[in-house]
Image (cartoon, helix red, strand yellow):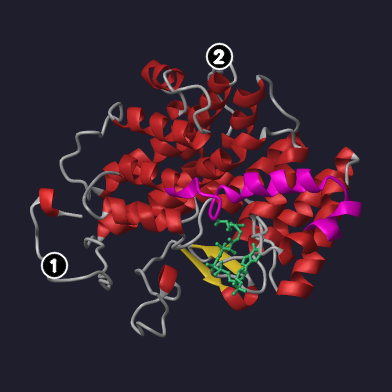
């Protein structure tokens, strides 16, 4: 089914304008990503995830007192009801962490004080929900991980921000400042990314006048796939299979010869490099130097060079994120849930924007099957 056969059809909706947004903008030629006009490099290197969450959800950068109030609201909302923990415990052994997150948010929705909001487009109620959804993401993700690994969940610690609390609830003890700083930057970089698949799916969901939690669950299900959020876990699995810089070139050339997709490379929008990856690569290399382990960074250098020369394809954010998280001692099955902890802010911002000026999203399609067939009785069918 090509665009040549159907000139009005773009496979994968590539290049199709899906809507208007003031949440974020990619400038492809400069590999630049801006959240509401602010370069993500500045937000990641000088700001904080909470400032970014405020910017995305509320539409502007906070003043100090607004940020203090926002942090206090997040702090007050981080705990999750015991029923959510019971539901996570009820999941079958081996349930994917992303599926456990869907369970968590599905159960959580009915506990939201605005659950019965009469008007699904009520902006203020949706902002309140977005703050609760953001506050609880790391709590659900770490509870799910610990339960899946036979451990009890750890309650959030008052006063710790999202990145520090995530690491605390994961390990049971606070982590050093640099680890927190890197995690905060990764969350900031993962927070939002225009009309990607999960954000679009989230907007489609809420545009039916469903609700914000359903939009988040839709987003999680869509992000799970290896062509989207799941790529960071697959990228680490690939790096581990390669093992050492000496194996990298042969492994990669063989993979390319057999038309394998190299996880953590390529992007539908960016064609000369993903700006988020450029910054996170610097961070990931620095972690390697600090930890005395440059193995993954060295493999990455070789792969990046060959991919650029052979395919003109650059790493996306998931490639450096994979070995940065690994070097920080984060379990691989949490890499995509970390994406969720950040991206709930972008999904919420888009859902609110959609509902502020809503129209049902319902594209057309081209039918390629048969028409006018005659119905026959079941006994007569061959
Ligand atoms: N490895 C090898 N070849 C690739 C890759 C890759 N990672 N990405 C693209 N190509 C090739 C592809 O084989 C095709 O070549 P040809 O025209 O010879 O068949 C050409 O580039 C176009 O690829 P495409 O898959 O049609 O491009 P797309 O815009 O549909 O795909 C993508 C974008 C991200 C799905 C794809 O690059 C990919 O599968 N990458 C690996 C998965 C990945 O890292 N995903 C994370 C995306 S960024 C994080 C996020 O926001 O989710």
Task: Give the labeled residue for mark 2.
Answer: 152
Q: Quick one: 58 or 94, which is closer to the camera?
A: 94
Residue 166: numbered disc: none
Task: Give the labeled residue for mark 1.
Answer: 373
Decide whether residue 223 is among the magenta residues.
yes
Is residue 57 in sight in this rendering? Answer: no
Give left or right: position of 337 versus 101. Answer: right
Confirm or deny contact between disc 2 and disc 1 (CB under 8 A). Answer: no
- The residue depicted at 47 percent of the width and 62 percent of the height is 194
Give left or right: position of 238 versus 358. Answer: right
Q: Quick one: 180 or 374, which is closer to the camera?
A: 374
Residue 18 percent location from the top left of the image: 36, 69
Ligand 1 quadrant assignment: bottom right
Q: Check the image and report above or below for 131 versus 27.
A: above
Image quadrant in which you'd find residue 366: bottom left
Q: Check the image and report above or below for 132 versus 377.
A: above
Is residue 278 in sight in this rendering? Answer: yes
Residue 219 percent location from the top left of the image: 41, 47
Q: Quadrant of the C terminus?
A: bottom left
Question: Which element carries disc 2, helix, strand or loop?
Answer: loop
Total numbered labels: 2
Question: Which element carries disc 1, helix, strand or loop?
Answer: loop
The segment highlighted magenta reads 222-251
Q: Quick one: 188 or 364, which is closer to the camera?
A: 364
Q: Check the image and report above or below for 46 versus 91.
A: below
* Structural crowding at the residue carrying mark 2, measured as other residues with C-alpha within 10 Å and reported as few (<14), some (14–19) or many (≥20): some
Residue 3 percent location from the top left of the image: 41, 81
């Amino acid at each position: 089914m090509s665009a040549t056969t159907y000139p009005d059809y773009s496979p994968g909706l590539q290049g199709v304008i899906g809507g208007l947004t003031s949440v974020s903008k990619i400038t492809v030629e400069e590999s630049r990503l801006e959240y509401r006009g602010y370069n993500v490099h500045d937000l990641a290197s000088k700001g904080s995830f909470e400032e970014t969450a405020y910017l995305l959800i509320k539409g502007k950068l906070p003043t100090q007192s607004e940020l203090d109030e926002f942090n206090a609201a997040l702090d007050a909302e981080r705990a999750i009801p015991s029923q959510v923990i019971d539901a996570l415990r009820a999941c079958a052994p081996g349930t994917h962490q992303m599926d456990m997150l869907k369970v968590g948010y599905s159960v959580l929705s009915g506990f939201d004080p605005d659950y019965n909001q009469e008007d699904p487009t009520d902006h203020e109620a949706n902002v309140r929900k977005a703050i609760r959804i953001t506050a609880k993401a790391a709590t659900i993700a770490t509870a799910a991980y610990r339960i899946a690994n036979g451990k009890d969940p750890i309650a959030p610690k008052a006063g710790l921000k999202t990145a520090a609390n995530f690491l605390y609830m994961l390990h049971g003890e606070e982590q050093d400042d640099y680890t927190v700083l890197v995690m905060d930057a990764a969350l900031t970089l993962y927070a939002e990314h225009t009309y990607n698949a999960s954000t679009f799916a989230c907007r489609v969901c809420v545009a039916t006048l469903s609700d914000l939690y359903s939009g988040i669950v839709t987003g999680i299900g869509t992000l799970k796939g290896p062509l989207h959020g799941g790529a960071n876990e697959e990228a680490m699995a690939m790096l581990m299979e390669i093992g050492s810089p000496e194996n990298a070139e042969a492994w990669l050339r063989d993979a390319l010869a057999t038309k394998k997709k190299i996880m953590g490379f390529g992007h539908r929008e960016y064609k000369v490099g993903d700006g988020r990856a450029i910054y996170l690569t610097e961070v990931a290399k620095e972690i390697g130097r600090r930890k005395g382990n440059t193995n993954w960074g060295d493999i990455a250098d070789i792969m990046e060079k060959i991919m650029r020369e052979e395919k003109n394809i650059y790493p996306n954010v998931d490639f450096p994120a994979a070995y940065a998280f690994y070097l920080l001692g984060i379990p691989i099955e949490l890499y995509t849930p970390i994406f969720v902890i950040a991206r709930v802010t972008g999904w919420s911002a888009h859902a609110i924007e959609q509902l502020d000026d809503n129209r049902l999203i319902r594209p057309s399609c081209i039918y390629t099957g048969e028409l006018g067939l005659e119905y026959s009785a079941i006994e007569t069918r061959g």
